[in-house]
Image: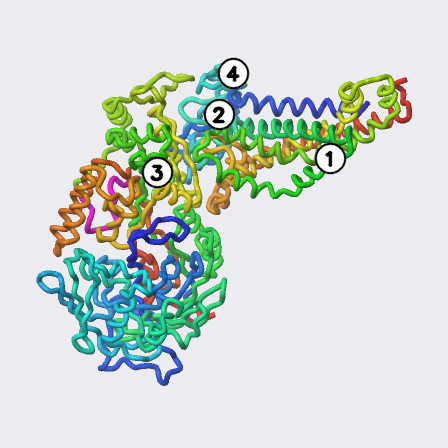
Amino acid sequence: MTQRYGLKGWLLALAVLHGIVACAGFFAPYDPAEQDRAHPYLPPMRIRLVDSQGLTHLRPFFHPLHLSDGSFDQYGESTDQAIPLRFFVAGTRYRLLGLVPFRIHLFGAQASRIYLLGSDAYGRDQFSRILYGGQISLLAGLLGAGITLFLGVLIGGIAGFYGGWRDGALMRVAELFVALPWLYLLFALRAFLPLAISPVQAFFLIILVIGAVGWARPARLVRGVVLSAKERDFVRAARGFGATDAYLLRRHVLPETSSVILTQAAILVPQFVVAEMTLSFLGLGVPEPVPTWGNLLASLQQYSVLVSYWWMYVPALAIVPFFLVYLGLASALQQEAGTEKIERTTGGDRW
Amino acid sequence: MVRMAARSTFCRWLGCGLLLAGATVFSRPASGSPPQTGSSEELLTLPGEIGKQGGRLVVSLRAEPKTLNPLTAADAPSREVILGAMQADLIHINRATQLTEPALAKSWKVSADGLQYTLTLRKGVRFSDGETLDADDVLFTFRVCLDENVHATQRDQLIVGGKPIAVRKVDAQTVVFELAKTYGAGERLFDGMAILPRHLLEKPYAEGKLAQTWTLATPANQWAGLGPFRLKEYVAGQKLVLERNPFYWKQDTKGNRLPYVDELVFLFVPNADAQVLRFQSGETDLISRLGSENFSVLSRQEHGFTMSDAGPGLEYNFLFFNLNAPGEKTSPDLARKLKWFREVKFRQAISAAIDRDAIVRLVYQGRGAALWGPVTPGNRRWANPSIPHPARSLDKARGLLKEAGFTWTPGADGESALVDSEGKPVEFSILTSSTNADRTKMATLIQDDLKQLGIRAQVVPMEFRSLIDRVTQTKEYDACVLGLVSFDTDPTADLGVWLSSGGTHLWNPEQAHPATAWEAEIDKLMEQQLAAPKYEPRKKYFDRVQEILAENQAMIFLASPDILAGAKNSLGNFHPAVLEPYVLWNVEQLYFRNPTENAR
């Protein structure tokens, strides 16, 4: 029973994290592409409750930063100015969940822009960009995993259930895909594509590629499970009663693979998020100014950024909670599956 | 004379880059007693701080030079090494004053019609192996450079008015050069023309093997030059070691023979960031071609470095649109876009909408200059002061677009989109070189500027060679951000950019006939400035060229970066110039204040 709670806990955490990213427009104070050219590489602002005289305020506030004289990226705090943080303020228009037009943001400030996690080379708000960037990166991970698993179940199912030459042929193809140097394949692919592809096209291209390349491993797993499932007594019995292949697959064989598929999904999603980040980092992903986690990290390729602006690393940290939750979920799912198997083989207390 | 400013070496379409400081050569140390400054030698005396002899100067080089043969050197690293440190020319352009000055030729005379140059050689000059230089070496050099079978990179530069320059020996110290047509840039022609040792190269030339001689693997005793340093050792993939030329023909005001340092080492460090790390750790003594970001990183950390900002160089960055005539293979989509691009008001509107100050501030961290024409503030003699420098104005841009027949339609989310007279939205892509972060940044800023006009531009970073292929060969592109570096301040350096027949006439290269009236006028003006022997009339013609360019905005000039360099505090005479080679132009005068510590 403890595992059940564990699973629920992980699922809840997952829902919360994804909810925040999905509603990026609400949580982010600004448009991710909006440039504030007067404030490049501004360090994160400190949110304070206690002012310079030691008085505690109920409403959080911050001191605006100003460029030090003659400098390009050195800022000083204007401690004489305290700008209160405001909640549920009207700001830039956005579409909540991509659908509903909305203007209310969780927080914001008047008189000065608030940079929770600093700004980048163009003075764009790093915090907003991380949230919006998550939308693309996570969606790419989820859709990529979806395509992979769909192909994996389809191909693995056919190979395992029908066996024979079909099995042989499909599994050889799978091995070929496992052996492909897919990163170089992508470089080649990108060279053949039309010059300017829009961010949306680039996005779907990435998903297609990472989805199409990753199907081989889940397919082999599914095939293994199907192979053993189709020899079970109850499956043979059903066949004896005249069940069709489609019925057998749907009712008896594929449900057996569900735990494998769910566990695979929880592992594949973060893996594909990293794949998207790698591609964008190398400039093969979604083009600027659309933020993705990979795009955000791409600026770290420059030595000067690496040593001067620590907040440019923050997007790398953003993925950590997501990975923890996904991997936690995967192990909870595995334990769950393990318990079920034991229950089924021993008869358990279900009967 | 123009180089594509990209990390990758790109063949110079124009041929003659006159890059390097007067190169001279060293004698070999073992050949008897070191030469004394005698009365038979006419040494060139350089003003400047008196240095100390000794030490070893280590600098990094972006790539391994491909050759040590000046005739075949086309890549930037080879040219930097050969012309900067190993060879010398007859007349040299002083990188600091940007004027010509005597080098191997101690004086010269130009005939009244500007067709005849009489050069008198310095007496007693010796190659680095101790052999004496005379007029026959000069004759030999020009003969091989002009020989079609040698395929010398200098050949194009020596064909003036369609005819090769004729060279005639008067006596052992006097050579006459005859040009078929007046050449505006005059004696600047001789800068970078390394004079070769006839005694070593005559045999390979007779055997037809000249182009294959003087590779990096050449033994030091089969190599000789007139530059301040001579070949000592080459370690493949790692470094090239040069030693001082004891026969060098320059001295300081106290009569000490130059150069000061004993050894000059070029380390091959391909990556700009790695070069910074080497410099920071003290492995190299000098760093040049610094980006503004790395410059501020180094300036912030005080490790005993002298960081120097020499001001804007001769690099000009610009946005240009595809102005080629639509061909049979042009897609209807591109053909429609070409119609916008050919509308001068459209280009003027884009120019008015671009925030050049933001480019200078955000791309170059303020270490650069905004540009409205091709002549950068680093070029002291040729800028036309009457070119207007209008501030960014979206209103003006909108007005121009309206006049050109463009309108706006309200789009989703309250933003309005610009549409052409047929109601099609104005969208185009901007190519940039993927290896050049600065230009990609410029394009991203322009993208945002244009968004405010309702134009959707997309930035497409691309590998440099495929980009050049698109621009000059297939011509399938909308717009492009690129930069050029003039090798010299003289307008003749960029002839191939402004002439409509030029290969670097990027917006519509290699035209058989000028496509527009203004391009025809530029062609004529460039010819006229080339044929005029005096500075003043040449300046007038080139001023007009700048006005036509500013009017027509075929190139929308953006910004020019400062030349940034750094050196250890112990290095004396460190005076970066805005002409290449930025810091090694006075390599013979560089010295260490504590030479024993740098002997290593």
B378 is higher (above) or lower (below) than B67:
above
Q: What's the magenta region?
A: B369-385
Mark 4 belongs to chain = A
Q: Give the residue at mark 4.
A: A99
Label 2 to label 4, Cα distance in Å?
A: 32 Å
Give x and y (percent) for residue B598: 44, 68
- Label 4 vs label 3, nearer the camera: 4
Instruction: Label 4, secondary structure: give it.
Output: loop
Label 4 to label 3, Cα distance in Å?
A: 35 Å
Q: Give the residue at mark 1.
A: A220
Label 1 to label 4, Cα distance in Å?
A: 39 Å
Q: Give the residue at mark 2.
A: A61
A237 is higher (above) or lower (below) than B497:
above
Mark 2 belongs to chain = A
Q: Give the residue at mark 3.
A: B359
User: Mark 4: which amino acid?
Assistant: Leu
Q: Is residue A43 magenta?
A: no
Q: Nearer the viewer, residue B404 or B600?
A: B404
Label 3 to label 1, Cα distance in Å?
A: 53 Å
Q: Residue at left 22%, top 62%? A: B164
